[in-house]
């Protein structure tokens, strides 16, 4: 029987139900409720979670919450405490395979659920990775290094600079490909930053993450990792890329250019989309299929250029109707040196904000305009309001995505305060962040209800 004897994390109604039926955590149980029955293991409850539900790990591997108030009976049939350790197996060495370095920065990809706290714990050494995803050895000799262990919202200049320097060091040591495990939430910020900080890379630099942790049956962690490692080891694309699920099925992954990619869905595995362009390539376990030819090719030299300049006093302002000028004024008064505005339509803000923009410019603040629509260019010549704003010193940021313009402005202002030089850096494309045109097939938003789209989606709906 259960020797754990406690009710970790449970409180209130849920705790009362468990005590009532003498079912501590890790009990293997059959629960009867007014709405049906469930079989599974009672997991510890996260300390911050509500007091109304009991968390059950079903036989299928899914965790569900059972409302305590509907429970009629809990029958304990045994007890099974989870073990967190992932079996370590020595990663096989094969002299003919390329050397790939995997850097970990954290995020769901580096984690498994810790049922005790509801938090996640890392699974990271090559042995652990090989233990859980043996296919990785088909492509390369893998080395791993944990740089950070943060959820990606905690990434900042320290981590960006550290990661860029670590990449530079590995390339100089002769690695043939780099994979960076990263939380998905701000993966596109980091991808943009690395595209500017690490230039002229001779090898693929592939960012990868997972939307669902590896203890869930629907996890995308293993497949994304396989695709990313294959890309790093074998592809001839020497750019900073994001490698994540393509369609919602697991047919293939997509390789997105680091400056044109964005997380577009809070929970779908197919969340990353190339915006205003088409992805660089498709990747499956078997092959990498380029979708375009203009990518930078793999080289044998080690001539990477790392420039980790960074100015922290930069902000991004998402314009909303009725915005007051004090938003801009307060940034200027707080010593901000750069502001990226995500404006409406072709790049607009309301008239009352104009004087604040003028003042910002006069105080030497670099102000750049981008568009909330994400697809398309800022066009400030179309309306006289746009021309007025340019006269106030607002610089149109072409078709740079707002977050990309933000990261680039941090990088540019890290190098110089001279606004003309900043402008030259900002408007000279470095890694595809500004393109001459956006192809029409680079614009695709699934609109349910349209027959062609419904047919396409139905193929992938699970
Ligand atoms: N919050 C997590 C992160 O970005 C989510 C993830 O990894 O997908 O670190």
Image: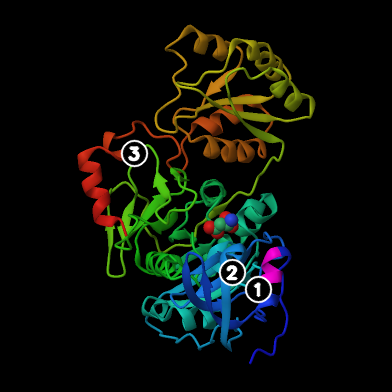
- Asked if disc 2 and disc 1 are in contact, CB closer than 8 Å, the reply is yes
- Magenta residue span: 13-17
Q: Closest to the observer: 170 or 442?
A: 442
Q: Closest to the observer: 331 or 365?
A: 331
Tell me where residue 49 sits by quadrant.
bottom right
Magenta residue check for 16: yes
Vertical placement of residue 458 versus 1, above or below: above
Q: Nearer the viewer, mark 1 or mark 3?
A: 1
**Badge 3: residue crowd in 10 Å (few <14, some 14–19, many ≥20):** few
- Residue drawn at x 79%, y 29% is 334
Ligand 1 is in which quadrant of the figure?
bottom right
Residue position for label 2 = 55
Quarter occupied by the N terminus:
bottom right
Residue position for label 3 = 445
Q: Secondary structure at mark 3?
A: loop
Residue position for label 1 = 44
Residue 146, given in percent of the width and then of the height, sits at 62, 70
């Amino acid at each position: 029987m259960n020797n754990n004897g406690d009710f970790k994390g449970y409180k209130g109604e849920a705790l009362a139900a468990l005590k009532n039926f003498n079912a501590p955590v890790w009990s293997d149980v059959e629960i009867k409720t007014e709405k049906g029955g469930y079989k599974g293991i009672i997991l510890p409850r996260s300390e911050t979670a509500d007091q109304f539900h009991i968390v059950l790990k079903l036989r299928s591997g899914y965790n569900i919450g059972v409302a305590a108030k509907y429970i009629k009976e809990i029958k304990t049939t045994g007890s099974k405490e989870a073990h967190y350790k992932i079996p370590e197996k020595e990663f096989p060495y094969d002299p003919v395979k390329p050397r790939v370095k995997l850097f970990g920065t954290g995020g769901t990809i580096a984690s498994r659920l810790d049922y005790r706290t509801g938090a996640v714990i890392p699974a990271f050494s090559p042995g652990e990775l090989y233990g859980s995803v043996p296919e990785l050895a088909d492509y390369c000799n893998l080395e791993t290094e944990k740089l950070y262990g943060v959820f990606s919202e905690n990434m900042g200049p320290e981590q960006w600079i550290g990661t860029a320097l670590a990449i530079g060091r590995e390339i100089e040591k002769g690695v043939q490909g780099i994979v960076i495990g990263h939380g998905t939430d701000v993966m596109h910020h980091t991808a943009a930053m690395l595209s500017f900080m690490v230039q002229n890379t001779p090898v693929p630099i592939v960012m990868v993450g997972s939307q669902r942790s590896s203890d869930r049956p629907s996890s995308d962690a293993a497949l994304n990792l396989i695709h990313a490692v294959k890309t790093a080891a074998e592809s001839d694309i020497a750019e900073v890329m994001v490698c994540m699920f393509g369609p919602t099925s697991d047919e293939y992954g997509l390789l997105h250019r680091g400056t044109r990619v964005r997380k577009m869905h809070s929970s779908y595995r197919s969340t990353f989309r190339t915006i205003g362009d088409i992805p660089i390539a498709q990747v499956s376990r078997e092959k990498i299929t380029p979708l375009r030819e203009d990518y930078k090719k793999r080289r044998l030299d080690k001539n990477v250029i790392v420039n980790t300049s960074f100015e922290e006093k930069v902000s991004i302002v998402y314009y909303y109707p009725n915005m007051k000028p004090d938003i801009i004024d307060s940034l200027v008064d707080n010593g901000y040196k750069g502001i990226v505005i995500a404006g409406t339509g072709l790049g607009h803000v309301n008239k009352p904000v104009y004087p604040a923009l003028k003042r910002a410019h006069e105080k030497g603040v670099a102000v750049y305009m981008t568009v909330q629509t994400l697809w398309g260019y800022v066009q400030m010549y179309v309306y006289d309001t746009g021309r007025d704003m340019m006269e106030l010193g607002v610089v149109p940021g072409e078709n740079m995505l707002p977050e990309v313009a933000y990261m680039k402005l941090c990088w540019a202002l890290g190098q110089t305060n001279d606004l003309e030089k900043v402008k030259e850096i900002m408007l000279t494309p470095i890694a595809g962040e500004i393109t001459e045109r956006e192809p029409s097939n680079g614009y695709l938003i699934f609109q349910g209800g349209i027959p062609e789209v419904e047919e396409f989606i139905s193929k992938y709906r699970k």
